[in-house]
Image: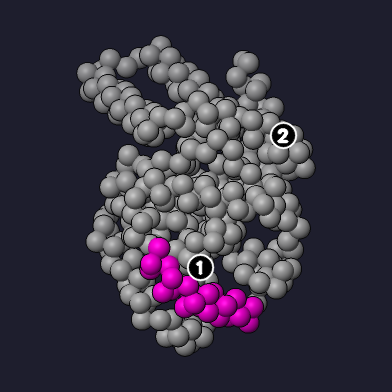
Amino acid sequence: MILIAVAVLIKLFSFFPDAVEKYYSTGLYPFIARFLRLLLGWIPFSFGDVLYAIAGIYLLTKTISFIKKIFRKQINKQYLFYFFKKIIFIALIVYVVFNLFWGLNYDRKGVAYQLNLDIKKYSTEELTEILKLIVVKMNNLDSASRLERNELKTKHILFSKSIDSYTNLKKENNIFGYPSPSVKPSIFSYAGDYLGFTGYYNPFSGEAQVNTTVPVFVQPFTTCHEIGHQLGYAKENEANFAGYLSAKASGNAAFQYSAYFDLYLYAAKELYFRDSTLLVPLRESLKPSIRKDYRDLRLFYKKYENPFEPIINKMYGRYLKANQQPQGIMSYNEVIAWLIAYYKKTGEI
């Protein structure tokens, strides 16, 4: 009964974004997040990945055991009552821990509120304009980024420079402080190539995990994105925007290029759907080396295409929709609305 009461209180609290922002996201959560990073950050591997592996094995063995009991006709009403009672108990624990440790951040007012950005629907003309600016940034950063790219193949350097990016961003705005950092390579990186993820945040351990097998020019922005989740930006568009701001502030051309490359993918995809003819001259204005990066990334993903990836994406999309992101997987693309609002306010990207 206590667990049910706590779960209900959490749900009721989530209906008040102002209170969530003040008392949880910028109140309690930073202490919880830092405690988790201090507790587990020193471990050289992802403790959260080990937890996921143990949970997966447990669920698999229990499922097999349940199926065996069905075939052996060992199922009765008493057993079913106990079985479903246990499932509900575990689900309640997961729900409470998930929300207290991180999940309530889905219901906060977020980075647009903190930075006083006016997020609106944008026109095709505004999208085209911002994409032109992104293309200019990418072309200007291309040569310098390639000189700094190779060293990022070393995980320690990649992660330390990502942390430095947020240190620089904090100098511009204190809300992006990142004490007691904890970023780690994913134990499941190779599996991630088949499942289609480049990084993820573990809300139960407070660790940010990065898939370090994907092309190196993708990894800086991914790492900054996952740190954004650690700072309490749960929604994907907000983590994308925090990742962009930090990579932009890094002073490292490879990080800046990685951020603009990712933004280009989002904006180009949206413009293609709206008016593909407008995209052609912008795409052709990219340097040949940048277009090669795009082809290399596309070939990398094509190499690992499999029947399970669409299923995983669909399931993840439903998870996002259940957590205040009605666009599902397309929530990542919504960062362009944040970028346009930021450009209107500051005159730069």
> What is the secondary structure assignment of the residue under circle 1?
helix
* 295 w.r.t. 204: above or below: below
- Please state which amino acid type lies under the numbered disc 1: Tyr
> What is the secondary structure assignment of the residue under circle 2?
helix
Q: In which quadrant will I find the N terminus?
A: top right
Name the residue: 64% across, 34% down: 29
Q: Is 221 placed left or right of 22 in the picture?
A: left
Residue 98, quarter of picture: top right
**Res 27 label:** 2
Q: Residues within 10 Å of mark 2 (few under 14, many from 20)?
A: few
* Residue 344 located within the stretch drawn in magenta: no
- Please state which amino acid type lies under the numbered disc 2: Gly
**Res 260 label:** 1
From the viewer's side, name the closer residue of 346 and 313.
346
Magenta segment boundaries in residue numbering = 125-148
Position in image of residue 276 (x %, y %) = 47, 82
Residue 131, quarter of picture: bottom right
